[in-house]
Image: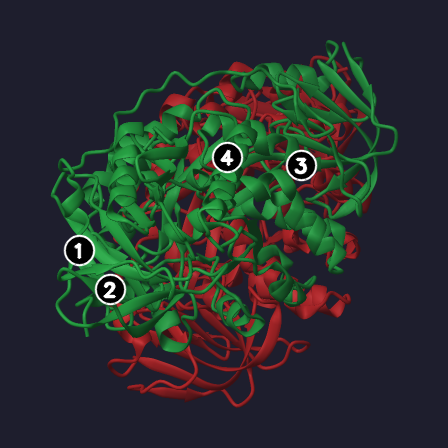
Chain colours: A red, B green
Amino acid sequence: MKLDIRELIKSARGDEPVDLLLVGGKLVNVISGEIYSEDIAISNGYVVGFGKYPARKKIDLHGCYICPGFIDGHVHIESSMVTIPEFARAVVPCGVTSVVTDAHEIANVLGIDGIRYMLESSKFQPINVFFMLPSCVPATKLETSGAKLTGFDLYPFLSEKWVVGLGEVMDYPGLVHAEEYLIDKIKITVGKRIDGHAPGLLGKDLSAYIASGISSDHESTSISEAREKLRKGMYVMIREGTSTRNLADLIPLVNKENYRYFIFVTDDRHPQDLIKEGSINYLIKKSISLGLDPVCAIRIGTINTAEYFKLSRIGAVSPGYQADIVIVDDLKKFNIKMVFRKGELVAENGKFVGKKIKSQVEVRGSINVKWLYQNDFQIPAKSKKAQVIEIVPEQIITKKKAVDVKIKNGFVQSDIKNDILKLFVVERHRASGNIGKGLVSGFGLKKGAIASSVAHDSHNIICVGVDDKSIFNACVEIVKMGGGLCVVNGNSVLGRLPLPIGGLMSEKPLRQVNSSLKKLIALSKKLGCKLSDPFMQLSFLALPVIPELKLTDKGLVDVKKFKIVSLFV
Amino acid sequence: MKLDIRELIKSARGDEPVDLLLVGGKLVNVISGEIYSEDIAISNGYVVGFGKYPARKKIDLHGCYICPGFIDGHVHIESSMVTIPEFARAVVPCGVTSVVTDAHEIANVLGIDGIRYMLESSKFQPINVFFMLPSCVPATKLETSGAKLTGFDLYPFLSEKWVVGLGEVMDYPGLVHAEEYLIDKIKITVGKRIDGHAPGLLGKDLSAYIASGISSDHESTSISEAREKLRKGMYVMIREGTSTRNLADLIPLVNKENYRYFIFVTDDRHPQDLIKEGSINYLIKKSISLGLDPVCAIRIGTINTAEYFKLSRIGAVSPGYQADIVIVDDLKKFNIKMVFRKGELVAENGKFVGKKIKSQVEVRGSINVKWLYQNDFQIPAKSKKAQVIEIVPEQIITKKKAVDVKIKNGFVQSDIKNDILKLFVVERHRASGNIGKGLVSGFGLKKGAIASSVAHDSHNIICVGVDDKSIFNACVEIVKMGGGLCVVNGNSVLGRLPLPIGGLMSEKPLRQVNSSLKKLIALSKKLGCKLSDPFMQLSFLALPVIPELKLTDKGLVDVKKFKIVSLFV
């Protein structure tokens, strides 16, 4: 439904019956900061007025609360492992009618094509998807990504209506040193927002980062860090993702004097948490349970985000605003009874009831691997001692330790007894033949191998396993699927979850993807794996910006030294 | 000083001494809502950091308060009767470093040329002047203005960096009836703000007005009116002008829940009030004295306005923000000790100390009158009874009354005894020869005439007087000056204030204009005038949107009927 100003004016005047009148509800007015009984008149997809109106249809809300549709201020949709249409059908019943996404993951795989794919597949879906342009593709020079995006590449996207700025500038050391490639991108982002990503950055370096024009950050983990960022003018995005949860730590900082500069974001939420907890609705509910004033909490999940991103006609229930409305039973229980998007009922009692519009957008395959042989996965022993990546369960950091390795015929072998397994990262964008080789401790596999094409941020193929045959077959299975996850034992593929879109996303619904994922985890456990989510853990082993020891297709990375180091001591 | 991101980053890091360090002050942090001791580092015209920095220059603030430069959210600079450079030198010492102006007055005279003149003459001045495009030129069809501005005329200005939206839509009945010429202008204003002007508009009509896309209003005079506008999503601009003063009435509505949607504006402030009271500093001080929390009051005069108009790097004292800073001695006394603009000291203890940069912008003459003869000012008596405009002192409304007129040789004469004087509006844009003829009661002149080329909104020449010779000579004097104000008796021009720019503004400094104006008022009093400010009163007699009886160049206007009526009953 296109905005027709003449029609809005006519409907607002009450010249003809409005499409829908919501009666008997209590309006959470995020502009005036009040809650009071009010009827809401809706026509042509927009709120047109309050109070008595002749209406073609009435819905009695029986005292429920009327909130604006929730807005997720920063989310990587790829982390849900489903397409935008399926993501929408999953989060709309949670009351999320708008998201601001940064297609950082798919852009690392498919570059401009990836961004274009995401933009196009969000059209006509029951959710407003705004985009921040990925600012740091590739994330580092220590890995091979599928694309390199310069200011020149991003520039044309900035005139796209749904693009609202430049995404999280995660290379904060680069920016603090005024690196050309970042300054370029900041300069072209005129009149739109630039998001930050600066964990632990404080003092003069933080001032430099902010002075460049970055006005938000979602990486604060403590009150003192968030307070300094706020005082220096940043919007503080409070994140409650799957592996990164900061809400309980940060909510005590929010008060009536400063609440307007806070925004709720999920960043990365995996399928299981979207299903179990929900999305922004969960953050609002949890912050209320932690003692935050409900109107404050709802503002942080709606109007604040809209104002920060300069979104028009979104974020409030008010004349002229898009009729994106969430009906909540109670401000403590916070059950989402109904969700309207542009005036249409799209969810009821947790079920999506809107029109299911299949996205017709196509995207090219993303797996481009040099032909593999089993002996590619041999590791010639250069010494008896090697540096091993030590998993920290449930966390994305790792530790390093030097251990004596098991050697046979001059090649390093997985050492089941001591839980030292072979780990590989196979470059999959340019068929360069790069294979990073390492050793990892913590998975506990006794046989077989598991592999994935989701491996932050370059998303090469990552595989951990016991024997070369399993490892080889697992990597080949990923190639055959065109990306995905698998569990293999010898020549048997025990389980697989194809992720054909960029090797990151399935075309299946979220619940189906989640149950496939659960099965794969169960299969891994049968092979001896001790981790609660081995695929999540695996996906961060290739991320060379998080300490301490990581593996990319270019080799072992000592993160503190920020360079490739030898596997052997 | 142009924004140089690389330099800002370098300065913020403290790699080299900053230009200026403000030490020993207390920061009013409008982002975090706190007041605390903080040192402010400034380089290249921008705030770069807080705390200890090596600095080329230090200023000790001895415990004074550090506020962001004040922003006037809606002001017609023409009402100050001086050019933008002189206006800047007058308000900068008041702490006003940014204004949002609507060149509605000069646009009614000179059209696009007028807007262009204002835009150009604001360049390089010690103040940021943002523009809203006049939406209603001419204001009505009942008068002859110098220009008619369509959406087509305004469109190119919308891509100008300093243009931040569409100015007050004062034809609210037109908009509520979806008039094409207004819808056009609203449609082209994409991503920028549209200001409202809707005195007393409530209920469904208000909803229609807002739904069209208008998001502020500065015409509320009561709490209940302002509350309805706020609840429906409008920013409430609290106005304290010269003849329209709403601050005391509206401040009680402001609280911690809703303060973020209030903005301070002066709308129209005459020279005397700018000198005596000041500008936005006066509104902040007065609202604090009325009990408003000082941080709230300062936010309403700074960051709120910046956010509403989506202004970047303005409205706070924070890294990356323009170093527009006001130093205040005390939050009650609120004396402005120093004002910095882009890091330069531009005012100290009420005196402008910045560089005086003369504007070199030229503008064509605006007086284009058909050659006048004394007998143009005869009023043939068509009956014995006429409708007389009755002045309400200090107000812009008038009343009407029917009286028996004094007739001589078939012509109506001024009746000194009953204070019924002849009033004329001479069209001065197109030399059409239009002369509106009427009668007015309330001036009390016993001899002579006074005339002005300031006459809202079309700014034709308006003249009140006793005898035809004085009236004729007064009108001719306005023409000779190329616009202005004068007091005439017979053939003697007793006093004159040329306003060569659009017939609205002088090139002289504000204090000089004010003392000329005072002299003219004193001269009027010598002629018998009873009004405290006859020129102000005169200037509103031609404004046909304010009840009850007005006079334009087209004739007498009955405002309630909204049409031209006969002078005679």
Do labels 1 and 2 touch, CB within 8 Å? yes
How far apart are the alpha carbons under marks 3 and 2? 46 Å
Q: Which residue is mark 4?
A: A459
> What percent of the width, then of the height, locates residue B142?
20, 58
Between the C-alphas of marks 1 and 4, the distance is 75 Å
Q: Is there one chain holding both mark 4 and mark 2?
A: no
Is circle 3 on the same chain as circle 2? yes
Q: Residues within 10 Å of mark 2 (few under 14, many from 20)?
A: many
Tell me which chain the residue with mark 1 is part of: B
Indicate the chain on which mark 3 is placed: B
Kind of residue at badge 4: His
Q: Say which element carries label 1.
A: loop
Read off the chain for label 4. A
CB under 8 Å between discs 3 and 1: no
CA separation in Å, label 1 and label 2 = 8 Å
Nearest the viewer among A342 and A399 is: A342
Give the residue drawn at x 75%, y 51%.
B294
Tell me which amino acid carries mark 3: Pro
Asked if the residues shown at circle 3 and circle 2 are in contact, with their CB atoms under 8 angstroms apart, the answer is no
- Label 3 sits on residue: B68
Residue at x-position 39% and y-position 26%? A371
Taking depth in this image into account, of B263 and A173 the one nearest to the observer is: B263
The furthest residue to the front:
B409
Q: Would you name the residue on which mark 1 appears?
A: B554
Q: What's the CA distance linking mark 3 and mark 1?
A: 48 Å
Q: Nearer the viewer, mark 3 or mark 2?
A: 2
C-beta proximity under 8 Å, tags 4 and 3: no
Residue B497's place in the image compared with B43, above or below, is below
| Numbered label attached to residue B557 | 2
For residue A384, side relative to residue A37 (left or right): right
